[in-house]
Amino acid sequence: MSYADRIKRDVLGVDTDDLAGLGAVSEPVARQMAVGVLNRLDANLSVAVSGIAGPDGGSEEKPVGTVWIAWAHGEGQEPVQVEARCVHFDGNRHQIQEQTVAEALRGLLSIAEAHL
């Protein structure tokens, strides 16, 4: 888990300008996180999540429950494919986290099934 922007930047390679300008909860940041996992862990499939689970931290533009999920996959010499989706979940912090995990896993399963 890379909760801190410092980890997103230093470990996963997320662009500092994107973090500062767009915020951690954005499509480019989620995409970069997913690709960063592939690159740094020599993986074939990854998922990244960046969102606002609350109860605080939301804004008019990005209310509590806003979550970007990105999935990256690629093998060997094939180019990395990245899919990203913004979802909005209702509920308390725990419920938003549960819904996020379920959605992230559904996406992983879908990609795995399509490429097996």
Image (cartoon, grey):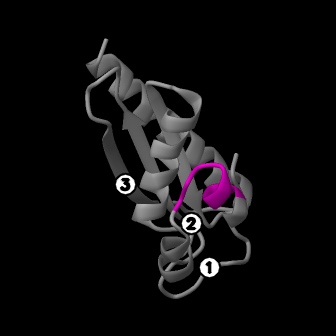
Q: Name the residue under label 3.
A: 85
- Residue beneath the point at 46% across and 54% down: 32
Magenta part of the protein: which range? 7-14
Residue 42 vs 90, above or below: the answer is above
- Residue beneath the point at 73% across and 53% down: 94
Q: Mark 1 points at which residue?
A: 58
Residue 15 lies left or right of residue 8; in this view the side is: left
- Residue beneath the point at 56% across and 71% down: 16
Instruction: Tell me the CA gap for discs 3 and 1.
Output: 18 Å
Instruction: Tell me the CA gap for discs 2 and 1.
Output: 8 Å
Q: How crowded is mark 3: few (under 14 residues within 10 Å), some or many (20 or more)?
A: some
Residue 50 is situated, as x and y percent measured from the top left of the image, at 57, 58
Residue 15 is situated, as x and y percent measured from the top left of the image, at 51, 65
Q: Nearer the viewer, residue 13 or 64?
A: 13
Label 1: which secondary element: loop
Residue 2 is situated, as x and y percent measured from the top left of the image, at 69, 51
Q: Mark 2 points at which residue?
A: 65
Instruction: Tell me the CA gap for discs 3 and 2.
Output: 13 Å
